[in-house]
Amino acid sequence: MSTKDRVLAILETSEDFISGQLIASQLNVSRNSVWKAVNTLKDEGFQVASTTNKGYRLTQRTDSLNAAVILPLIHADIDVEVFSKIDSTNSEAKRRLNGSLDKDLLIVSDYQEEGRGRLGRAFYSPAETGVYFSLVLKDLDSKKDATLITTVAAVAVCKAIEKLTSLKPQIKWVNDIFLEGYKVGGILTEGIISLETQSIQSIVLGIGMNIVENPDLPETLQDLVGALFKEKGEISRNHLIAEIINQFYILYKNMDDKQYLDEYRKRCFILGKKVSFLDQKQLLEGLASGIDDTGALQIQLPDGSQRNLSYGEVSIKWRYES
């Protein structure tokens, strides 16, 4: 990472002025190197205030995705790579798994040409309005239930948004993030099987979030898809990505106690509501009554019987009530 990028990372995480000497000491470089880095940042359009005896401060944080900003905000020991454009962050993550990774890897892109959701559905991923990223868990802990990674991630996304904003996102079972009746995000978890052990060895966790409304949103999506905010500037995309990753690792580390399932249930807005679902081409209706410890959605059918719906088994159609 260049001195310029490291200086930017410090400025991004500092609310007040910070002296050139302190920055130089933290980075083990000269004050002149810091001065040159700040001038380069200014030339690149960053708004950096310089005051004698106080030092430097970003007066306006950039919304450009930057690994140098994201990485210092993440508490886990992982690598981060940022792309301006990519086919799919999940696809790139799986390509990286074909090689050699020293640690978990976060792939971030401003734009996806072929963003994907569950069941092969397209995920609309325009530039500058959202965050699209994939976390590679290169060595899945054999004690962790891989089928619950999506559940953990959904809670992590909600907790990160709640920490950084006043918003109250909700979850639509199993992998969608909603706000006020509109889908604002989705999660796609893919397992990589070891041919030797015939078990899941690695996980690619893909997350896409709509941060600001897109005026060019396709008409077919306008009644379904929303965003966290109407305009830019309400939240740093870099900070949101880092906080989601931090929340995920906290929950992932402790997922064996399954306390996160209570957090998931609390935010799952379809519980207590009537839902319809397709089962072997037959449309059935029932009451979404709960989520069991395997993450399955429990449906009470009109005849009094219960059906437990597992991942990938059905698609749910729901009725949103404000």
Image (tube, grey):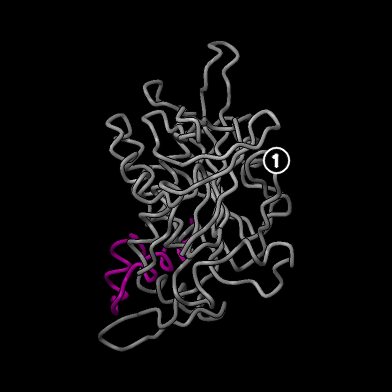
Residue lying at the far bottom of the rendered structure: 52
Q: Quadrant of residue 276?
A: top right
Above or below: residue 115 compared with residue 137: below
Q: State left or right for residue 270 relative to residue 11.
A: right
Can you give x and y, in whole percent of width and height, for residue 186 in the image?
55, 50
Work out whether 246 lies above or below 58: above
Q: Is residue 85 left or right of residue 76?
A: right
Which stretch did the figure color magenta?
1-29
* Location of residue 182 in the rendering, given as x and y in whole percent from the top left corner: 55, 62
Residue 151 vs 66, above or below: the answer is above
Q: Residue at x 62, y 35 (%)?
A: 94
SS under mark 1: helix
Looking at the image, which residue is at 42% across and 62% down?
A: 239
What amino acid type should be assigned to the residue bearing mark 1?
Gly
Q: In this rendering, would 11 be left or right of 129?
A: left
Classify mark 1: residues with Cα within 10 Å, few (<14), some (14-19) or many (20+).
few
214 magenta-colored:
no
Q: Residue at x 48, y 55 (%)?
A: 1
Q: Considering depth in this image, is 31 or 42 the residue closer to the camera?
A: 42
Q: In front: 273, or 188?
A: 273
Residue 8: within the magenta? yes
Give the residue number, with chain letter if any, for mark 1. 120
Residue visible at 42% across and 48% down? Answer: 268
Tell me which secondary structure the magenta stretch mostly adopts.
helix
Does residue 50 appear in this view?
yes
